[in-house]
Structures are given as C-alpha cells and as structure tokens.
Amino acid sequence: MFIAMECIALPDLALRGRMKLKHGVRFSSCTPKVCIVGSGPAGFYTAQHLLKVNPTHQNVHVDIYERLPVPFGLVRFGVAPDHPEVKNVINTFTQTAKHSRCRFYGNVNVGKDVSVGELKQAYHAVVLSYGAEGNRSMGVPGEGLAGVYSAKDFVGWYNGHPSCRELNPDLNCETAVILGQGNVALDVARVLLSPIDILKKTDITQPALEALVRSQIRRVLIVGRRGPVQVACTIKELREMVNLPGTKSEMVEADFDGVTEALKDLPRPRKRLTELLLKTALDTPGDKEQQRRHQASRTWGFRFFRSPSEVLADADGNKTVGIRLAVTRLEGSGEGARAVLTGEVEDVTCGLVISSIGYKSHPIDPSVPFDTRRAVIPNTMGRVKQATGLYCSGWLKTGPTGVIATTMNNSFDTARSLVEDMESEALDLSSVKTGSEVISALLEERGVKSVSFSDWEKIDSVEMSRGEASGKTRTWSRRETILLL
C-alpha cells in the first residue's frame, strides 16, 4: 500500500507539511495517500482500518490495485461454492471500496504493468497484500503426470478463476487421493462427492458442474503424514463431511490406536475435533445411521501416517494410475509431533491426485526484499525490512496460514504500524505525491485498461442475473466478457 499526500497551501512555509493539534499530537497538513496491491481479504481489511477516522490522519486516501479484473481474491475464487455464508464478508469489503476516500483499479498487474518503484514515487506508502498465488511442490517423482493437480488450481477451476478455467481435469476414475488434511482438502473432497442437486444450486462454474455430472469418482482418500490428533481441518468442515448425503466414511482403525487415551490432555477445540473423528471411525452406528451408510454410493476417509513418495504412471509414462505412500510414525506428541519415515511403503490405485499441502507467495518486483525459503516478505509488524514506506499484510506477511479472521487481525496490525509511522514521522508525509493521477497516466500510455469498482458492480449485476435465470446464485463471467463490459 502506498500513501501519497496532497498538501494545502499554508501562509507560513515553516508550517507546511505539519501543524500542531491539541494534546500535542502532530499531523500532516497534506492528505496522505496509500496504495494497496491486492484486493483480497488482506488488502481490504488493511484499507478498512486505514480509512477509519482517527485523531491524527482523518483524510487518508487509499487506492487498491488488483491484477485480476474483479476484486475480493480468495473470497471469490477460494471459498467453496457450497459455503455462501463465508462470502458475506464481500458486503463489508464493498462498503470499503465505495468509501469516498477509496478507489479500486482492477486489471493492473503490479510488477508488469507498473513497478513497485513507480508506486513508491506516486504514494507516501505502499502496502503489498497480493497473497499467495503459487503452489508448494510435493517434490516427488511423477508429480508432473496428467491427473496430478494442485488444490489451488482445482479450486480455481470450479470457482471460475481466469487462469484455471481450461484445467479440464479427468474425473473418469474411481478413486481420488488428496494430499493434505486441512480445510481446503476437505472442500475439494466434498465437491468431488456432493450430490449434483446440491452443487447445481451454488455458484460453481457450469463447466465444473458438467464435469462432476459425468464424474466416475466414488472414493476419496484424504492423506496426512501425521495422526488424528494433528489433523489440520476444523470441526465444522469435518462435520460437513460426516453428514454429506450419499456418502459414508472409511477409516483405518489402527490409525486411532492410543488416541482415546490422549484426549484428556488436549485443549478443548482440538478435543472436540478428535472426539468427532473417533466417533466417526470407531463407534458402532445406530439403526438410522446404519441405514444411511448402507444406502451410500460414495465413500471418503482419512489416511493418517502416510506421506507421498511417488506418483505412479501408466505403461506409457504419461498418466497417473496410483500413488506410493511412505508409512510414517510420530516422534513427540501433540501439535509438536514430527513424522518420520519407517521405511515401509504402500501403493494406492487412483486416477486423480490433488496436492493440498499449501500455497506459496512469489516476489513480484526485484526491488522488494523477499525470503525465498519462507516465501514471505521479511517484515516487522508489517513494516518491510530495509524499505521505508513499504509494508505488507496477509499471507505475504505471515505465510499461508489461518482463516479470514486471522487475516483480518494480521492486516489491522499492519495498518496500525503504518499509522504509528505517520504519527511518529518515521514515514515522511511532507512531500507532495500525486497518487493515482500519475499511475493512471502511466497505465494509459502502456495500453492497460483498468477496471473501476463501478465497472465491477456492472459485472456483478450481470453474473447475478444470469445465475438467477439458471437457478444458481451466480454465473461466472469469462475474463474477455469482463473487459468488454
């Protein structure tokens, strides 16, 4: 995010750039302008906090630049289509975007269409909040075979992300294996196994819906290298899998050895989650549940203490036909337990492998410090190290962890750091900055057509109308259609 200021004329030049307020608080006589790169939760929450009226800087202006033509990042492209309530946060972001001191510029690729250096010249401060667009590699032989996908791309495919719409995964197999046991992994499993009557009422893309209608997948295994006590999903997502119509769970009883005894030492949220896992895996079902399971045509299950060692190819060496899993055991206990290899392996026949082992941020400009090992921008409370006036928030700041509420608090902290720097004069607000005026001129010279928030509202209206006509909540626009609206 960048802050630029427009100074007002003062009769005494000694007062230009700052003046005294009561209680001894100083503030700039200029209008601070901030640029935020990225319009996902991190970007919008940072903007929201900066736009709050505060006694020191009441007129901060915020410009948000987004690589895609549409806003909201992972709220639009990462939330499962059957979780519309999670997307309600868009209403809050919309209020921020329509604030009189906020502007949205979509379809602007920072690092390509305009450099971070150019943004720094135009604004007093820049906040980088562009998230984690990359995938963590499994690092095993065969991960480049047909039939192997990252969860990020698979989710992007069924949610209409422009870069994933041509993914066209082959679902003509009986078993899918998902590597990773977090909420995203369970989202993918649920979408693969959900009854079509449920999915067709959501905003899932039409190509994805049609592919799932034809899908032959009847079994999904969700694989993790540690045990039930360390599973990364939340109880809400697990409960949704347990109650998913037309499905039943398929667990390995031996994976739960010793778990009952460990319950007493677990914190309450982890204890509740583990109790539900135990009940699902080991309890004898009642008559009603037994009947439901008997009628189920699809199965799912966790596989604990397993780590991928190789994706197995067909005779031609092109297509996935299975995955080799290394058996692990735990050293230590609780959240800090570490998985170590036992030397044993087992092969699982499958035609689809989805890696859900994490997202990864990438650097977008060589002028910005970047920790390639941790895939984050090195920072202290959101202040980019050795780069005055440059800040970061969201996953770019912490790595891909937590839920939307985590990102909210993380982004508020960055905004507070920025405000503190304005108040302490660590951030220079004395010079005139032109903000979006000069950046818009540069973009026009370079043939870049930006998308305003009012343009987005037209897109949104069209998507909602088309969705209503087809009995869905929304029908996604293609990128070309968006840019023509």
Image (cartoon, rainbow, N blue to C red):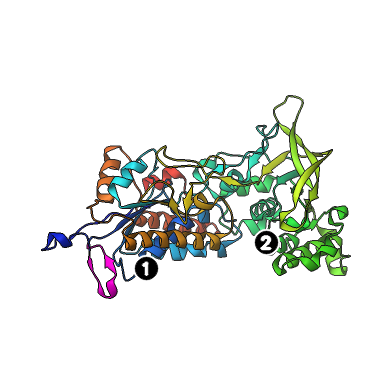
Question: Looking at the rendering, which quadrant does residue 108 occupy?
Answer: top left
Q: Give the range drawn in magenta.
A: 19-29
Q: Distance between the residues labelled 1 and 2?
A: 32 Å
Q: Which amino acid does label 1 sit on?
A: Lys
Task: Please provide percent x and percent y for residue 227.
Answer: 78, 53
Task: Please provide percent x and percent y for residue 211.
Answer: 64, 45
Q: Is residue 399 magenta?
A: no
Answer yes or no: do the residues labelled 1 and 2 have beta carbons within 8 Å?
no
Task: Please provide percent x and percent y for residue 70.
Answer: 43, 51
Q: In this view, does 168 lie to the left or right of 242?
A: left
* In this view, the mark in front (1 or 2): 1
Viewer-nearest residue: 262 or 64:
262
> Which residue, given by chain and number where applicable, does mark 1 sit on?
52
Question: Looking at the rendering, which quadrant does residue 26 occupy?
Answer: bottom left
Give the mark nearer the N terminus: 1 vs 2.
1
User: Which residue, as the protein is rendered here, is positioned at the far top?
Assistant: 316
Q: Regarding mark 2 in the picture, which secondary structure is present there?
A: loop
The answer to whether residue 380 is seen in the rendering is yes
The answer to whether residue 291 is seen in the rendering is no
Task: Please provide percent x and percent y for residue 352.
Answer: 71, 40
Residue displayed at 42% across by 42% down: 368
User: Which residue, as the protein is rendered here, is positioned at the far left?
Assistant: 11
Q: Is residue 24 magenta?
A: yes
Q: Give the answer, above or below, for where 344 lies relative to 434.
A: above
Q: Regarding mark 1 in the picture, which secondary structure is present there?
A: loop
> Which residue, given by chain and number where applicable, does mark 2 sit on?
234
Q: Is residue 414 left or right of residue 141?
A: left
Viewer-nearest residue: 248 or 26:
26
Residue displayed at 23% across by 53% down: 431
Q: Which amino acid does label 2 sit on?
A: Thr
Q: Residues within 10 Å of mark 1 (few under 14, many from 20)?
A: few
